[in-house]
Image: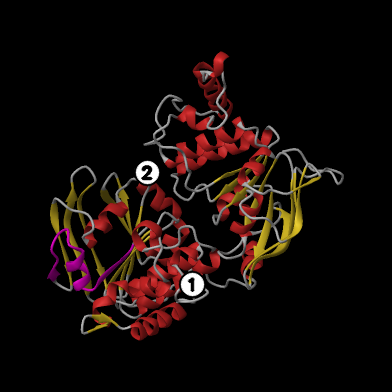
Amino acid sequence: MRRQNPGDVPLLDVRGVSKAFGAVAAVAGVSFPLYRGEVHALVGENGAGKSTIVKMLAGVHRPDTGSLLVDGEPVSFGSPAEAKAAGIAVIYQEPTLFPDLTVEENIVMGRHPRRGLGMIDRAAIRAEAERLFARLGVRIDPARPARGLSIADQQIVEIAKALSADARVLIMDEPTAALSLVEVERLFAVVRSLREEGAAIMFISHRFEEITGLCQRVTIMRDGRHVSTDPLDGLTIDEMVRRMVGRDLEALFPKQDVEPGAVVLEVDGLSSGGVFRDVSFSVRAGEIVAFAGLVGSGRSEVVQAVFGVDARDSGVVRVNGRKLRPFSVRSAMGAGMALVPEDRRQQGLVMDLSVERNVTLPRSGALARFGLLSGRGERREALDWTKRLRTKFGGLGDAVGTLSGGNQQKVVLAKWLATTPKVLIVDEPTRGIDVGTKAEVHRLMSELAADGVAVVMVSSDLPEVLGMADRVLVMREGRIVAEIPRAEATEDSVMFAAMGAK
């Protein structure tokens, strides 16, 4: 990385920008520079204003006050096309390629090279795609359809598309949330090569190990305001957390010591052809049991089969000795089981419905009077649970899709906790949410266990697994290969088991 001198002109300079939506100030007076040849982290809790900053840089919103400068010259973007023309590209967590077009057609979309008589130059398109993938050091077939590409490959195609349009500033918004460790390393290799070429990259992530391993400087936001911009050298994670949440985070993993009670959940010989086989485990009241393992090991598929979302070929699931019907969510819910799914947007919430209606959906029958829903009862229950989970929103009538990711996660939790479950299954409970909200989710899980709930947690976050679990069940290739008690669980012991290493 080239070191910045005091006289260097930032490639992108954000100066005192503010943006309000009605009476809500999303961003207030935020400033920071972005230089050539650096990866610059932008961090903060959900609702800190990061997404609004991204949308202003991408031309989706205009700042109400303040200014944006590119190469020292003021710019004003009235549309995403104008931001792209200035060399700014955004790589989102979920790429938006045209699935029925080829990879190479997606790369040159809107800028097709032409031959004589206006004919599209297919050979030039192929050469451009191959040149870009060689530059990025990746191997993707330019002629294959975009449909079916992994999220990781889609992101690489989006980067190639940005470079084809001469982008000099790349904004990467939570790009690793859905990637495996191998895919993350490949993405980071691409980012480092772009940095060496002189690109300016803004990297948004909730994962501190990624920030410290990839970035050179960090800008921290809180409540829509700029807190600090500093080199990462010498800046500890504890200090970053303190600045983000405005207080000392005494315990990210507030695990209470609980004496487990009787067995509540029993799973015996669960199998599903080609996905997982012969999975058996039990969970006692007051116990938190975590499933760990690499992406694709079968963890999520097991808990979905336990809850009855997915079919199983064989095996038995019992709650308090009661045998559940296979492939029946109704049977699982009737026995007192709840599942907070990994994909909260697609599986956990109805995004167009209100906060109130989402919270009370599983209990709509219990809240009905003479076949009609009680609006007062819905509001009372929704308000009670959203207060308990410290959920931030404008009003209970707001569409849940307007909330930040962390607050959406709290609504999913509220929805299932309102059913007073005996068994709570949480799949990646803190993925994509900020450190302050993570602490609140962990506190809630610990309190539920202390109240006698049997908790099953699937997590790819090793510190979370080690910090919250009484026992760790490690899966590899569809089987449980290790059971590690809390006292013996370390990052090494879990990863060695997950990878089949000795």
Query: Is-magenta flag for residue 82?
Result: no
Secondary structure at badge 2 equals: helix
Q: Which residue is mark 2?
A: 499
Residue drawn at (42%, 72%), measured in percent from left and top? Answer: 355
Pick out the residue farthest to the right.
Answer: 7
Amino acid found under the numbered disc labelled 2: Met
Q: Which circle marks residue 440 in the picture?
A: 1
Q: Alpha carbon of mark 2 to alpha carbon of mark 1: how far? A: 31 Å
Residue drawn at (18%, 53%), measured in percent from left and top? Answer: 311
Secondary structure at badge 1 equals: helix
Depth check, mark 2 against mark 1: the one in front is: 1
Q: Which residues are magenta?
A: 322-340
Residue 25 x, y percent position in the rendering: 65, 69
Q: Earlier in the sequence, mark 2 or mark 1?
A: 1
Q: Quadrant of residue 325?
A: bottom left
**Residue 388 visible to an observer of this rendering:** yes
Q: Is residue 72 above or below residue 113?
A: below
Q: Would residue 30 appear left or right of 258 to someone viewing this image?
A: right
Residue drawn at (35%, 62%), measured in percent from left and top? Answer: 348
Taking depth in this image into account, of 40 and 51 the one nearest to the observer is: 51
Q: Would residue 14 appear left or right of 117 to someone viewing this image?
A: right
Residue 70 x, y percent position in the rendering: 75, 44
Q: Quadrant of residue 200?
A: top right
Residue 216 x, y percent position in the rendering: 69, 47
Amino acid found under the numbered disc labelled 1: Glu
